[in-house]
Amino acid sequence: MDSVSLGPLVLPLDRLVLLLTAAALLLAAQLLQRREPGINGWVTGVLIAAVLGGRLGHVIQYPALYADAPWQALYIWQDGYTLWGAVVAMGLITAGFVLFRGLALRWLSAAVAPALVVALVGWVVVHNLQPEPLELAEAETVFTLEGEATSLQAESAGQASGVFLWASWCGVCRQMMPDLIDAAREQPESQWLLVNVGEQPEEVHAYLAEHENDWPSNVTVVLDPKQQLMRDWRAYGVPTTLLFDAEGVQVDRFMGRRSVSRLLGSF
């Protein structure tokens, strides 16, 4: 299990833990506001710093990803953050509040403590709920665009592979497609298998006719019209991405949009 359903919203567990941690910090600061009037300002500052610092750290670590379109570094709603960047930025903001605004360390610690507990408990829960690593050899039969039966193991050709479960109606899937193509170009020795789930061949052909232009040869589109992979792999929504090593053993999985660096980092 790597996500939870909240009505129509499907949220990855790691994102949920981050939201709950931030909520715990905000609630603790609100309760301590009467004792330490400046603590709400500190919490607002460190949360903003975490987002901006984490994003800046990612841009510094992967500058090539933003060379052609540097303005995309400002797309903070997309994946692409580093823990070290967030920690450094939060540390600087905290030092400023302690040194120049007289924020008492004891109240700061009192606000941080419950957030740390939520983060640690959440990490343990997410870790224990992760499914056992999958193997490509055990995947159900899929179909080529011509309707011929094939397997993901055969299509992977004994190379490290990324399997992307998607649908043409899924907006996030369409947004992530260029990232996948970029990842395929960055690693031509890998295979990228775009598994369309639940749609008919004519729908997929119509989408590809509009979007498939200069895709590299290591990108293959296959069909899973009955969504059997979704059920077998306990994927609760699209897009879901699974990364496999050259032996066909899963090394990473995640739901939702992820950056090129995340796609390449597990190989």
Image (tube, rainbow, N blue to C red):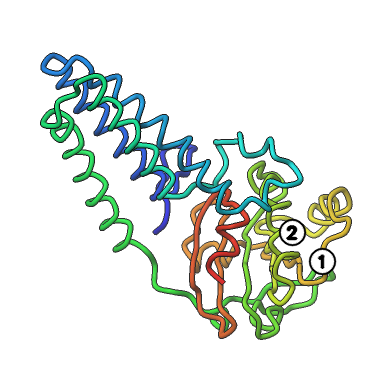
Instruction: Say if 106 sits above or below 86 in the image.
Output: above
Give the amino acid at mark 1: Pro
Amino acid at circle 2: Ile
In the foreground, 62 or 177: 62
Q: In the drawing, does residue 208 fall left or right of residue 38?
A: right
Other-residue count near label 1 (Cα within 10 Å), few / some / many at <14 / 14–19 / ≥20: some
Foreground of the two, 235 or 43 = 43
Which residue is pictured at 69% across the width and 61% down the height? Answer: 183
Q: Does dot 2 land on a helix, a strand or a loop?
A: helix
User: Counting other residues with Cα less than 10 Å from the Cα at mark 2, is it few (<14), some (14-19), or many (20 or more)?
Assistant: some
Looking at this view, name the residue that lies furthest to the front: 99
* Figure check: 58 above or below 228: above
Q: Name the residue under label 1.
A: 216
The residue drawn where x is 46% and y is 39% is 53
Q: Position of residue 149 (x, y in %)?
A: 74, 78
Residue 71 in the image: above or below residue 252: above
In this orientation, which residue lies closer to the viewer: 57 or 127? 57
Sequence-first disc among 2 and 1? 2
Instruction: Give the quadrant of the N terminus.
Output: bottom left
Determine the image quadrant of residue 180.
bottom right
Q: In which quarter of the image is residue 11?
A: top left
Location of residue 144 in the rendering, given as x and y in whole percent from the top left corner: 78, 71
Does residue 21 sit above or below 191 in this rendering?
above
- Cβ atoms under marks 2 and 1 closer than 8 Å: yes
Q: Which mark is residue 181?
A: 2
Between the C-alphas of marks 2 and 1, the distance is 7 Å
Q: Which residue is drawn at 84% across and 50% down?
A: 211
Identify the image quadrant of the C terminus: bottom right
**Label 1: which secondary element:** loop
Instruction: Judge left or right: residue 62 versus residue 70.
Output: left
Locate residue 107 relative to residue 65 in the image: left or right. left
